[in-house]
Image: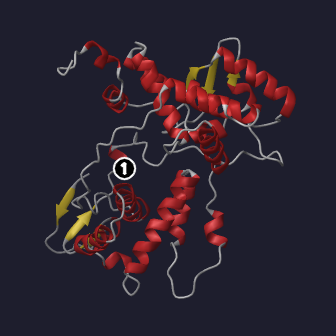
Amino acid sequence: MVRFFINGKNEQNIHEIHYQDNFAWINSNYFFPKSDFGRENDSFDVQWFRNREKSEGLKTCPEAYLAKLELKHYANNTVRTYVSCFEAFLNFFKERELLDLDENDVRAYLQKLVQEKKSHSYFNQAINAIKFYYEVVMEMPNRFYAIERPRREEKLPEVLAKEEVLSIINSTRNIKHRCIVSLLYSAGLRRNEVLCLKLDDIDGKRMVVKVRSGKGNRDRYSILSEKLLKDLRAYYLQWRPKRFLFEGPMGNQYSAESIAKIVKEAARSAGIKKRVTPHMLRHSFATHLLESGTDLRYIQVLLGHKSTKTTEIYTHVATNIFFTIKNPLD
């Protein structure tokens, strides 16, 4: 990305350059053709935003923004987040044109988010949604390069003990729920990855689970538990799913909310007081493998992490290293 200072505007080829306040933004995508920004490969539905009932007096997301999300094939969750965040930004500057806004205007909006005590995650999502419009839709790379982001939060993942996980699995209401919770833990899957599993993604001969188009549009394999395979066979004979491994009452894809509810109710039945989420089971899978001596690089592959730095967070919650340290009180 290159930023030029322009002293005056030459009419020759001026239509190829974006100007504002004597600065020009040149689209440098040709120099970086391998960027995977926005290339998620999950089900999405931009049409819902086009057809929804409009609120009187409020601005809605420009069609160009929706079209670019559609062309980029963003996932449903990303579409919802970007549209929601960008429309909030739009309506903060309801009386102004988007191309007239500068860095100070964006900072003023972000300052409002700080005052409203928005989360670190929401703050970053808002910046991403705003940058998506200017840098991707309007093709003005590095338009808000200087905008400050909040310092990264270094929170450790919440992890369950093995006994707690087994108790949750044993407290599920039926074989279907048992299989869902077992897959989240024993294969370290994300909730959406469980939802997208097809029947042939369970390979009982090689004892692996195929995860298609996981986060970052990357396929991978994870390990399959022998105990779970027996449960899955019993589940199939009882429920007879046709397309997805786990389907709703009408044969459609199971919902993310249903999985969250299954985990929550099973944890409550198991007498676990802490708030348990599907992703906590994935964290527990990685931590328990690390504690049992599995190489961190193998765990990285099983989780589908692009970088080992992401996987290294589990070294901070694995407790096996503590067993070799004698407490000074003792």
* Residue 296 figure quarter: top left
Which percent across, then down, holds residue 302? 50, 23
Which percent across, then down, holds residue 191? 58, 40
User: Circle 1 — which element?
Assistant: helix
Task: State whether residue 50 is above or below residue 251.
Answer: below
Q: Which image quadrant: the C terminus?
A: top left
Horizontal side of residue 137 vs 269, given as left or right:
left
Q: Is residue 102 visible?
A: yes
Residue drawn 39% across the image and 37% down it: 157
Q: Is residue 211 visible?
A: no
* Residue 50 figure quarter: bottom right
Task: State whether residue 67 is above or below residue 274.
Answer: below
Residue drawn 54% across the image and 60% down it: 80
Count of numbered circles on the image: 1
Which of 178/102 is in front? 178
Which percent across, then down, holds residue 183? 62, 29
Horizontal side of residue 222 vs 13, given as left or right:
right
Residue drawn 73% across the image and 26% down it: 200
Mark 1 is surrounded, within 10 Å at the Cα level, by few (under 14), some (14 to 19) or many (20 or more) other residues, namely few
Horizontal side of residue 208 vs 275, given as left or right:
right
Q: On the image, numbered disc 1 is attached to which residue? A: 29
Which of 157/204 is in front? 157
Residue drawn 64% across the image and 51% down it: 257
Amino acid, disc 1 = Asn
Which of 187/267 is in front? 267
Which percent across, then down, holds residue 192? 59, 42
Task: State whether residue 77 is above or below residue 230.
Answer: below
Colouring style: secondary structure
- Residue extending farthest to the left is 7
Horizontal side of residue 274 vs 97, given as left or right:
right
* Residue 141 figure quarter: bottom left
